[in-house]
Structures are given as structure tokens and as C-alpha cells.
Image (spheres, rainbow, N blue to C red):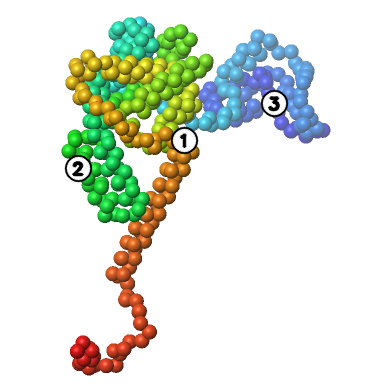
Amino acid sequence: IQKIRECKFSGLARNSINIPVERSFVFNVHKHAKVYGVCIVRNQSTVDTTVTEAVSKLQPDTTANDAVYNTVNNAIPERRFISEIPDPPAPFVEQIAEAVKFHANGESTFQSIGLGGWSPVGLIQHYFEWIHITCDMPWWAAITLTTAFLKIVAIPLLVDTMKNNIKTQNVLPELLRIQENLTEARNCGNKEEATEHAYHLQMFYKKNNIKIFPLSNIVRFGMHIPVFFALRGMANAPVESLKYGGVWWFTDLTIADPYYILPAFTSATLFIVANYSLKSVSASNMSPLVRYAVQGMPLVAFLFVMNFPGALLLYWVTSNLITVVQTEMFKLEPVKAYLNLPVCIKHKTPIKPKSNKSFRQAFSESWSNLKVTNKLAAHAKADLYQFNSAGKAAVKKTYKYNPVRGVSRETSAASVLAKKK
């Protein structure tokens, strides 16, 4: 006889008591149920096996068995394993998405793409947006018109600069003489003469109402800086309409010119403007090395502007062309009379005969002057250090022995008086 390991019932027992069965209740078939069929048992020898077939010796009523099976299934809930505790949900981060605003023509506003504001750059960007949307103007026309407008506004500043240059030209021989004396005194290390000539030069500027650094030049230069950064910000954003707002071969104003035509035009016009500036009055006393640097600037500028967006290069080329036109117009006598420009005196004698030097000679001379200046500055610093040390340090011994050591004050005084007699 094999030992019974465990009894299992499947649909063969009915609850004989009227007690609700809880989920944690262990159903005892001998105590709480009435058996209607043969029990399927598992013996000790078949603990690790699975019962696949059971033969019932009794033939119970099929209808009654089905009713009992359904009743038991409804009364005893099925035991299920509790699933693992899920991970806590990620914290919800509230994201506020700003709605993109559009103009009537379907273009997004500058404010919605991060442009504009109350800074000088932002105000100029708002101006470009206004002239493009309100006037229905393509971007190339808006940039060209804005450049021309800035040049017209800057005409009074340009006239003030020209008046200052003409005043300098009229007194240029005497001015160069004072500057040469000042340079010679500095190279010789004569501080007194250098200070005197510097004072004479300052009084000479004041007497003739000549400004060394006119404020008008600084303002004219400062007017172009916000426009430069405004156009660069619009191209980098980018403003979608700038991608097809160009003309001819540069239709996309947000990228560099693929044919390098605009950078070449920029360098060429910059070279023309540089030559005009070298012929002006203010460049008459310019050193040869600086003149060569100004002439070589357009070539170096090409390497920098070749990767600029088309919008920036269009603005730069237009500005240089307008500068050339203005310079030629201001040479006309009717324009000079209308602007009340003073008469420019043309000196017969050559003002600076030694200006025709090669680049090597000019560089060598400038380098020599720089070394002399640094040497004089080092000597002045050493003299100042020696002067301060003499006033603060102990007195240096300049004799081999002290002749008055061990002698009273009266004796030494008497000997001194005797020597004087």
C-alpha cells in the first residue's frame, strides 16, 4: 500500500456549508464538502510526476457535476501570485510651449524665434522686420535701403570730419615740424625738451581748433556695429524668409556665397575706400608702416569675410560703394559750397619727402624707433628706482676710515676752523 501524499479535487466537490469562502481560506474536502465522484489522488511514488489521465469508476450525473463545478468555481476564488511592485512613475515636468506667432503673410514673428528686444541690436532687428513686412520688401532691398539710410544720416558727422581734416591740412607744415622735434627729443632721451614740445603741440591743436580723435569718427563707426550683429543674428536664427530673400546668384542670405563673388567685391571696395583714406588730409602724417598695413588690410579681410553670411556681405558691399560715391561727390565745388567746407590750402613744397620708403625700410625704421623708446623707458625706470633707493636705504660708506671717530665735537670743530684759517 503506497502512502497517499496529497489529494486534489477538480470540480468533484460541493460546499456543504453555507459559509462564504474567503480568499485566504483553506478548503478541507473531508470537513466542508460532499464528494460526488472518485477522488484523484497522488501517491508517494508519483509526487514528481503529473497526472494526465484519471479514470472514474463511477458514472455520476453529468448535469449535477457541471452545476457543482460552476458553484465551486464561483465560491472559491482562484489564488494568484501578487505581481512585483512597479517602479514609481517619473515626476511630471510641466513644459510650457510658447505658441509661434505668424504675420499676415505667413512668416513667423521675430519675437517667437528669439530675435528682437530693447537693446540696440534688437531694435534694429525690429526695424528690419517692420520694413520687410509692412512695405512688402524683399530682404536684399531692405538691407540696401537701410544701408543707404544710415549713410545719409551720417552725412553731418562726415562733414564734421572733413572740416577737421581741412584744418589740419592748412597748418600741416608747422604741425609736422613740431612733431619731428618731439620725436627727436624722445629718441635722444631729453625729457625736458620732449615735454616742452608736447606742450607746444597740445597748444597748437587747441589754437587751430583741431581734434586729434574726432568724436564724429567714433559715432560713425559705432553706427555700423549694431547693424552687423543684428544681421548676423537674423542669419544664424535663421529667419526662414532670408533663405530666399536674395537676388541673382546669392538667393540664400543665410549662408556664405558659394562662388566667393561677394567676398571679392567686399575686398575690392574696401581697397578703394582705403586708398581714398590714404589720400585724405588725416593720412598725410601717417607713418609708412601704417600706410602699408592699411593697403594690405583688404587682402587679409578676404580671408575673414569669405565665410560670412550673404546678408552681412551685401550690407558691407553696399556701404563701401556708397562711401566711394560720397567721396567723389564731396570733391565737387558746388557741394563744398553748400556744406560750407573751408578752403583747403595746397602747399607747394613737399611736406614729407621721406615717405616713399619700401616696406622693409619702413619696418626696420619702426623697429629701431621701438627699441630706442623701450631703452629710454628702461633708463628712466632705473633712474627712478635709484632715486627712491637713495632716499630710503642706508648711507653708503665712501671712505676707507672715519677721521673723526673718537674725537670730541669741540676738537673736531676747532680743527675745522683752523683749516679754514
**Residues packed near mark 1 inside 10 Å, few (<14), some (14 to 19) or many (20 plus):** few
Q: Give the label, 1 or 3, closer to the camera.
A: 1
- Identify which residue is drawn at 33% across, 68% down: 389
Q: Which residue is mark 1?
A: 358
Tell me which residue sits at (32%, 12%) in the image.
145
| Mark sitting earlier along the chain (3/2) | 3
Q: Which residue is mark 2?
A: 203
- Residue 403 in picture, x, y percent from top left: 31, 89
Q: Give coordinates of residue 46: x percent, y percent.
A: 79, 30
- The total number of labels drawn is 3
Going by the image, does 330 lie left or right of 64?
A: left
The kind of secondary structure element at disc 1 is loop
Quarter that holds the N terminus: top right
Q: Earlier in the sequence, mark 2 or mark 1?
A: 2
Please state which amino acid type lies under the numbered disc 2.
Met
Separation of residues labelled 3 and 2 (CA atoms)? 123 Å
- The residue where tag 3 is placed is 8
Name the quadrant containing residue 236: top left
Give the amino acid type for the residue marked by disc 3 in the picture: Lys
Q: Secondary structure at mark 2?
A: helix
